[in-house]
Amino acid sequence: MRYGIFSGALWGLDTVVLGMALALAPFLGVGQAPLAGAALHDAVCALILLVYMTVRGRLGDTLAAIRTRSGLAVVVGALLGGPVGMTGYLIAINNIGPGYTAIISTFYPAVGTLLALLLLGERMRPRQIAALLVALSAIVLIGWSSSTEQTRGSALVGVLAALGCVFGWGSEAVVLAWGMRDDKVDNETALHIRQTTSGLTYLVVVAPVSGALGFAARAVPTPATGVIALAALAGTASYLFYYKAIGTIGASRGMALNISYSAWAVVFALVLLRTAPSPLQVGCCIVILTGTVLAATPRWEDLRPLRGRRRAGVDGGLGASSDGDGGVTAA
């Protein structure tokens, strides 16, 4: 269970640090900044994973996996999660800020659950559909709130980009779930394939076609790119924990725990940016978190140990007891 919590906390940190990078020169106010930032972010992630897999002596496993049908499915998932999802994510951050972006993009596990029903034939219970609709209503409210408050860019563009991110990440999860059913592709090789494919696609296709490659090259020696590298480090660690959580406790619970990053983003924004959330933002965040967790969890009974452990932590401090998955939980 702790892997999912760590993945959420680190992605929340990634969210805020990316927002800080895009607010620095030369990215601030530049239309090419989101694509250039995405290219640099995923390229750094790919380099980090290359070093990680080399140290672990697993480069051969990645090369073998990518030649399989499941490995090719991971490549497709990478395109959805990277060029589609990550670009939308950064465009949203650049327009409506990291807090709104994190809260809206929290919806991706519910979309993934819906796509799994349509494409993989997985059933959703009526109560899961109800939770999905509640979460969607909260997302609409967040979008309305964003459009009525001062933002750095277009609120409409930011919300639409965040929803594009939701679709990209949600569909990526479904494709990866199919690909990782093959024992030839484990969570580490899948992540290595994913990040390498995404990074290369940005640098070889997306950035040159959009005209952002030159801007990205000029931005490399600036302090802002160093901040992006720090975000990429947190993001890579988040993905490693996320894939590990999926392999340990399953996709539904892994996604449910990972989306806690919206709450962590609010915390990190408060600590690093001194941005205090409004009561409406806090309320919508809670509703979205609750709705998406329930929508992505077929057996709500599986969440009862989480509540029990959280209550035990309050009554007796940070306990060392563990649930059936061997992990710990956090609020």
Image (spheres, rainbow, N blue to C red):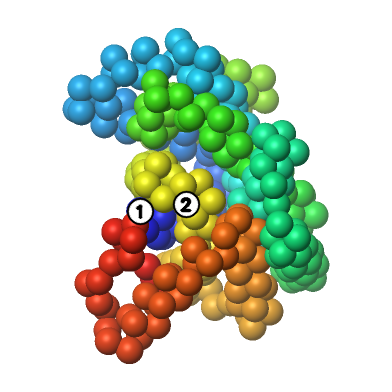
The reply, left or right, for residue 15 in relation to residue 76 is left
Q: How many marks?
A: 2
Amino acid type of the residue tagged 1 in the rendering? Tyr
Image marks 2 and 1: residues in contact by CB distance under 8 Å: yes
The spot of residue 204 in percent (x, y) is: 55, 17
Quadrant (top left, top right, bottom left, bottom right) of the N terminus: bottom left
- The answer to which of 134 and 45 lies nearer the viewer is 134
Amino acid type of the residue tagged 2 in the rendering? Gly
Mark 1 secondary-structure assignment? helix
The reply, left or right, for residue 109 in relation to residue 44 is right
Q: In the image, which disc is placed on residue 254?
A: 2
Q: Is residue 160 above or below residue 81?
A: below
Q: Return the disc, 2 or 1, that comes first in the chain's sequence.
A: 1
Q: Is residue 246 above or below residue 220?
A: below
Q: Is residue 52 above or below residue 107?
A: above
> Would residue 185 be seen by someone viewing this image from the given angle?
yes
Q: In the image, which disc is placed on residue 3?
A: 1
Place residue 215 in its image quadrant: top right
CA neighbours of label 2 inside 10 A, class few (<14), some (14 to 19), many (20+): many
Residue shown at 57% from the left, 65% from the top: 300
Q: Is residue 65 above or below residue 144?
A: above
The spot of residue 51 in percent (x, y) is: 26, 28
